[in-house]
Amino acid sequence: MARTVSVLTVTYGDREKYVSKLVSAIQKMENVQDIIIVWNGNYPKRKQQFDSNNIHNIYFSSNMGSARAFSEGLKFFATQQASEYVWMLDDDNLPDSSALSVLLKDYEESKNNLIFSSFRKDRVELKARGYQRYQSNSFFEFSISQKLGWKNSNIKSVSNKMNLIQCETVPYGGLLLPRTVLKEIGYPNKELYLYSDDNEFTYRMTKLGMHMLTDTHSLITDMEQSWYRKNPVPMFKTVFTTTKLFNACYTIRNRVFFEKHNIVTNKFLYLVNIMTYLIYVFFFYMPKNKAGIKRMRMIIRLIKEGWTGRLGQISNERIQGWN
């Protein structure tokens, strides 16, 4: 019996051209029963392309963030659709024609505790490393213990196939999630609003003893490069040069929240990692002027908010105040 799939994507702003290409690609795939599109504060100019019996459009009057948008889309899938799986895709993801069938074959040949996701072609560092996992008590992947050669104990791979990369978290884009697993893990945390909400959501599976595998034979091309990949310099260095702080603010705050609740086992060591890294940022990244000090204070404030769980949407006025 053929396995049935619902596709869920979230779009915002002036990105209809990406959604159009995505929908065209998906409609050619077998097993796709329906498509759920969450329009996050935008509205299609060529609405007729998205008016179909198997396309379900959900509209928000304003951008509610990726966490709430994907949450509402998943709720629609869980309550209104009957498909066995939901394939979550970013609006600028363009999957190869065989991407879905590869993942479905993975599920057919796997154990119940394995979760599969597509591989995004620009994630070359993931393919080179061969795995993704978090170092305990690290701050944005910085860890004094790791620098000294003290690493987490090795975890035995659950697969010996070279095309499967074991990950502790995966992005929304490419994740093929069984309905039964969604019932176990629930929906994304809306309070995260934007960034790290996919990490928090998918890490729940790791904590429940499931194993996520990214299949490099199931390929996705990103039609638009992610913001943090457009500029190859370290993010904390970019904070002092950019005039667009929106992305950085949510990234810093939400990453700290995620780390505290998932990978921190020693609060003192985590604090030492933060302080050590911020000292490095101060000496090597921060301009020694009023603007640099202002941004440094912003970073510290956002770290505190992530640690104390002060989440939700950050007002534009507040973000502009740091410019």
Image: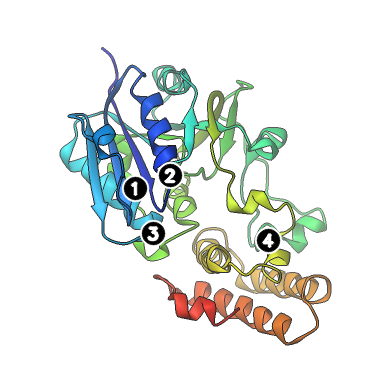
Question: Could you tell me if the residues under marks 2 and 1 are in contact, i.e. CB atoms within 8 Å?
Answer: yes
Please, which residue is most extreme toward the front here?
Answer: 45
Residue ID for mark 2: 205
302 relative to 45, above or below: below
Residue ID for mark 3: 65
178 left or right, relative to 168? left
CA separation in Å, label 2 and label 3 = 22 Å
Residue shown at 70% from the left, 83% from the top:
291
Q: Is residue 187 visible?
A: no
Q: Is residue 291 visible?
A: yes
CA separation in Å, label 2 and label 4 = 28 Å
The three-letter code of the residue at mark 1 reads Ile
CA separation in Å, label 3 and label 1 = 20 Å
The three-letter code of the residue at mark 3 reads Gly
Helix, strand or loop at label 1? It is: helix
Residue ID for mark 4: 235
Spot occupied by residue 245 in the image (x, y as percentages of width and height): 58, 69
Question: Could you tell me if the residues under marks 2 and 3 are in contact, i.e. CB atoms within 8 Å?
Answer: no
Helix, strand or loop at label 3? It is: helix
CA separation in Å, label 2 and label 1 = 7 Å
* Label located before the other in sequence (4 or 3): 3
The three-letter code of the residue at mark 4 reads Met
Among the 4 quarters of the image, the one containing residue 33: top left
101 left or right, relative to 218? left
The crowd level at tag 4 (other Cα within 10 Å; few <14, some 14-19, many 20+) is some
The crowd level at tag 2 (other Cα within 10 Å; few <14, some 14-19, many 20+) is many
The crowd level at tag 3 (other Cα within 10 Å; few <14, some 14-19, many 20+) is many
* Label located before the other in sequence (2 or 4): 2
Residue ID for mark 1: 185
* Label located before the other in sequence (3 or 1): 3
CA separation in Å, label 4 and label 3 = 21 Å
| Image quadrant occupied by the N terminus | top left
